[in-house]
Amino acid sequence: MRRLWSLTNREQFTAVFRQGKRCSGSLVVVRVLPNGLDRSRLGVVVTKKVGGAVDRNRAKRRIREAVNIRAILPGWDVVVIARTSIQSAEYRDLERELQQLLVRAGVIR
């Protein structure tokens, strides 16, 4: 994913955590905040509770693929936080849940 479409520093993540709207699911938590830009940006958080480096990187790749940042309406910062149950989840379940949470958050049609 290009830097242009990514949340890149701590201040950006902190703003979304403090002021953003939260939508929770069984596999992930989504937080969204309007950013005033002509594009949307994505941040992914996967803690060590999910597993070792290989498991965390796999979870991040799956989340980035399932979100499809270009489908999100312009002008949003989106942070996706993985829960430990993501390890055993099927990709299609993750994709379905992410789509439902993004629709509920109002950032995707």
Image (cartoon, rainbow, N blue to C red):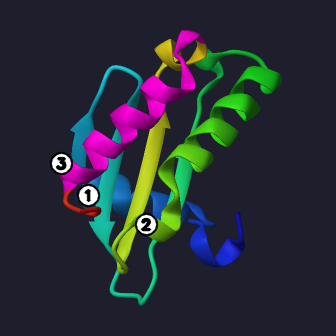
First of labels 3, 1 by sequence position: 1
- Report the residue marked by disc 1: 20
**Quadrant of residue 23 in the image?**
top left
Query: Could you tell me residue 109's position as x and y percent?
Result: 24, 62
Please name which of the two marks, 3 or 1, marks the residue nearer to the observer. 3
Q: SS class of the residue under badge 1?
A: loop
Type of the residue with mark 2: Ala
Taking the magenta stretch, the answer to whether it contains residue 35 is no
Q: Specify the farthest residue to the front.
A: 92
Q: Which mark is residue 104?
A: 3
- Report the residue marked by disc 2: 71
Task: Please report the residue visible at 61 percent of the width from the left and 18 percent of the height from the top.
Answer: 50
First of labels 1, 2 by sequence position: 1
Specify whether 89 is left or right of 14: right
Pick whichever, 100 or 83, lies toward us: 100
Tell me how far mark 3 sits from mark 2, CA to CA.
15 Å
Q: SS class of the residue under badge 3?
A: helix
Specify whether 69 is left or right of 58: left
Q: Which residues are magenta?
A: 88-105
Task: Please report the residue visible at 50 percent of the width from the left and 70 percent of the height from the top.
Answer: 70
Type of the residue with mark 3: Arg
Type of the residue with mark 1: Gly
Q: Specify the farthest residue to the right.
A: 54
